[in-house]
Image (spheres, rainbow, N blue to C red):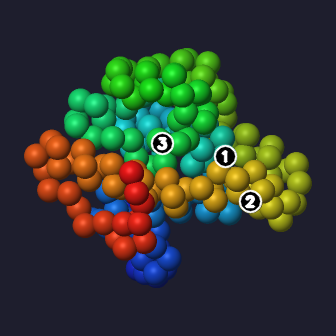
């Protein structure tokens, strides 16, 4: 269980970053990761499936460390769902379109080593060393320059992709609703700003 102070919850709701039922592709949460101004390092152990794999691997953190026995899975095809959390753009961008489609369309597990080989993970360590190594890396980065420089570096390096995300979320929402309807579910209401997407 995660405790989130009421003030932070309210702020996230007001800025459109909180998870809500209409947000089928978790656009608000994804945006919150992208817009986070401080250093963010993902330290992955165990399994990361679906949205968790996206949170770990789709540039929502600045760097990614993983246990050498960690495993990832995109199960969307088996669930009758489509890519979300901006992965429809980010995965092809990061690994190439053909490889991205294989990861999504086969719904096969893939190893941390494969994720590393694809450039999705920076470093692999035995599970017990992942958190300590993440802390060491954070300390090294924070010691390298001023906090202001880090914030501005993140801003300029993320900007070119971040500026495209609202359009990506709009299309992902439309397509996810079609997938849910095709599977016999009830599509969620599309927020007005997302409903403009044509496909």
66 w.r.t. 30: above or below: above
Nearer-N-terminus badge (1/3) = 1
Q: Which residue is disc 1 drawn over?
A: 62
Q: CA distance from mark 3 to mark 2?
A: 20 Å
Residue 5 horizontal side relative to residue 141, left or right: left
Residue drawn at x 36%, y 38% is 50
Q: Position of residue 66 (x, y in %)?
A: 56, 30
Residue drawn at x 64%, y 27% is 119
Asked whether 46 or 149 is in front, the reply is 149
Asked whether 45 or 78 is in front, the reply is 78
Crowd around label 2: few <14 · some 14–19 · many ≥20 (10 Å): some
Is any part of residue 47 visible from this angle? no
Residue 109 horizontal side relative to residue 14, left or right: left
- Callout 1: SS: loop
53 w.r.t. 165: above or below: above
Q: Which residue is disc 2 drawn over?
A: 155
Q: Which residue is disc 3 drawn over?
A: 87
Callout in the foreground (1, 3): 3
Residue drawn at x 72%, y 46% is 138
Give the position of the N terminus as an image quadrant.
bottom left
Q: Position of residue 186 (x, y in %)?
A: 14, 56
């Amino acid at each position: 269980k995660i405790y989130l102070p009421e003030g932070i919850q309210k702020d996230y709701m007001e800025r459109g970053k909180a998870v809500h039922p209409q947000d089928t592709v978790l656009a608000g949460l994804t945006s919150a990761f992208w817009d986070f101004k401080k250093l963010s390092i993902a330290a992955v152990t165990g399994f990361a499936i679906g949205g968790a794999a996206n949170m770990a691997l789709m540039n929502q953190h600045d760097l990614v460390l993983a246990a050498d026995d960690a495993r990832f899975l995109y199960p969307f095809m088996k669930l009758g769902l489509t890519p979300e959390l901006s992965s429809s753009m980010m995965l092809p961008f990061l690994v190439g379109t053909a490889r991205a489609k294989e990861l999504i369309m086969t719904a096969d597990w893939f190893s941390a080593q494969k994720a590393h080989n694809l450039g999705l993970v920076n470093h692999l360590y035995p599970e017990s060393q992942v958190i300590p190594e993440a802390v060491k890396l954070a300390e090294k980065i924070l010691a390298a320059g001023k906090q202001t420089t880090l914030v501005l570096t993140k801003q300029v390096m993320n900007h070119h992709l971040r500026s495209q995300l609202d359009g990506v979320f709009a299309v992902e929402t439309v397509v996810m609703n079609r997938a849910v309807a095709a599977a016999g579910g009830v599509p969620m209401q599309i927020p007005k700003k997302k409903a403009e997407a044509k496909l």
